[in-house]
Amino acid sequence: METDELNDLSSYIVTASLNDDQGIMGCIKLAQIAEEEALL
């Protein structure tokens, strides 16, 4: 299966821009989403 992202990987894959905090920022975002879903 092809997606738009796979057709232009040079734009899709970029260098990290969160000062090496991308892991913790991802965890925080997942926690926020889980909390929002729990409130529904």
Image (cartoon, rainbow, N blue to C red):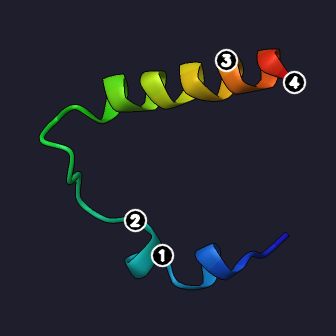
Question: Which numbered disc, 4 or 1, marks the residue that appears first in the sequence?
Answer: 1
Q: Position of residue 29 (x, y in %)?
A: 50, 31
**In the image, residue 35 above or below residue 3:** above
Using the image, tell me which numbered label, if any, was put on residue 40. Answer: 4
Distance (Cα) linking label 1 and label 2: 6 Å
Q: Which residue is mark 2?
A: 13
Distance (Cα) linking label 3 and label 2: 29 Å
Question: Which numbered disc, 2 or 4, marks the residue that appears first in the sequence?
Answer: 2
| Dot 4 alpha-carbon crowd within 10 angstroms: few under 14, some 14 to 19, many 20 or more | few
Q: Which residue is mark 1?
A: 9
Question: Which numbered disc, 4 or 3, marks the residue that appears first in the sequence?
Answer: 3
Question: Which numbered disc, 3 or 2, marks the residue that appears first in the sequence?
Answer: 2
Residue found at x 69% / y 20%:
34
Which mark's residue is nearer the viewer, 4 or 1?
4
In the rendered structure, which amino acid carries the disc numbered 3?
Glu
| Dot 1 alpha-carbon crowd within 10 angstroms: few under 14, some 14 to 19, many 20 or more | few
Q: Which residue is mark 3?
A: 35
Which secondary structure lies at badge 4? loop
